[in-house]
């Protein structure tokens, strides 16, 4: 079974630039999560999708972050414009449903904003 | 105060030692997860439990719902067990996970 795919794996940008991350969840998984993990901390949920609808985006900085999950499969997370404090690993995860099972994580995208 | 607290934050031990990592939480939960994160970022789910105890190989996870506490044990530890171990809880009624800050485990040969 293929796992959760993410790209790119690494990205370095200057502040005020834009960046986009892509995630392909495990086939059949209805729920998709984007997390931000700052060095030395646990992951923090940014947004949760159930199929193509948003379930929770309460911790998403909506002035600069946006995410979509068209057709309920792949998802993209965008930052525009980036700030220094956005430097982190962005993790995508998927599960069969709302906490009905384990979450499967992708390898993450390490973003460095200079 | 964080909703999920882990201890210790860092742990260094010798190969073969018995390891215990603790997790305490302050909210009602639907389930508790133990995750393993290796350098490079990849996260693997080890256990999901809502009561009692689970065992997988050398790993054992226990949870005490009344005391709001869980432990992850590693028997006969090995250098390949070196990783960050993260406790996460599913918040009752909120359908999301809240993560602890992680415990960095280093097993020396």
Image (cartoon, rainbow, N blue to C red):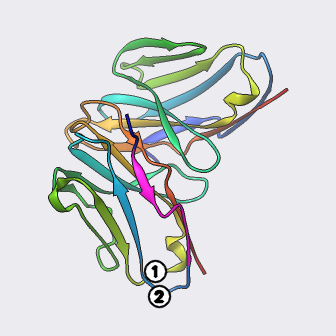
- Magenta stretch: includes residue A101: no
Q: Where does label 1 land, which residue?
A: A82
Name the residue at 61% across, 53% down.
Answer: A40
Q: Which image quadrant is residue A22 in?
A: bottom left
Q: Name the image quarter holding the C terminus of chain B.
A: top right
B10 is higher (above) or lower (below) than A10: above
Residue found farthest to the bottom: A16
- Magenta stretch: includes residue A10: yes
Residue B74 at what x, y percent from top left?
A: 63, 19
B63 is higher (above) or lower (below) than A24: above
Name the residue at 52% across, 85% down.
Answer: A15
A80 is higher (above) or lower (below) than A4: below
**Marker disc for residue A46:** none
**Mark 1 neighbour class, 10 Å CA radius: few under 14, some 14 to 19, many 20 or more:** many
Q: Is residue A91 visible?
A: no
Q: Nearer the viewer, residue B42 or A28?
A: A28
Relative horizontal placement of residue B64, taking residue B19 as reference (left or right): left
Q: Which residues are magenta?
A: A4-12
């Amino acid at each position: 079974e293929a796992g959760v795919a993410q790209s790119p794996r690494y990205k370095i940008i200057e502040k005020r630039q834009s960046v986009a991350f892509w995630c392909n969840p495990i086939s059949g998984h209805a729920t998709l999560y984007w997390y931000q993990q700052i060095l030395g901390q646990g992951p923090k949920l940014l947004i949760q999708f159930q199929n193509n609808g948003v379930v929770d985006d309460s911790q998403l900085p909506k002035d600069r972050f946006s995410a979509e999950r068209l057709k309920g499969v792949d998802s993209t997370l965008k930052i525009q414009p980036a700030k220094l404090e956005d430097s982190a690993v962005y993790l995508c995860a998927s599960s069969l449903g709302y906490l009905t099972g384990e979450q499967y994580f992708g390898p993450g995208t390490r973003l460095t904003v200079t | 105060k964080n909703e999920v607290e882990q201890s210790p934050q860092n742990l260094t031990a010798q190969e073969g030692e018995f390891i215990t990592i603790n997790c305490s939480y302050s909210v009602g939960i639907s389930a508790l997860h133990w995750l393993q994160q290796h350098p490079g970022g990849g996260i693997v789910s080890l256990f999901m439990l809502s009561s009692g105890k689970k065992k997988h190989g050398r790993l054992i996870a226990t949870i005490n719902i009344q005391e709001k506490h869980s432990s992850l044990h590693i028997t006969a530890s090995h250098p390949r067990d070196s990783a960050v171990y993260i406790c996460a809880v599913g918040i009752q009624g909120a359908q999301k996970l809240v993560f602890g800050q992680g415990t960095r485990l280093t097993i020396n040969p």
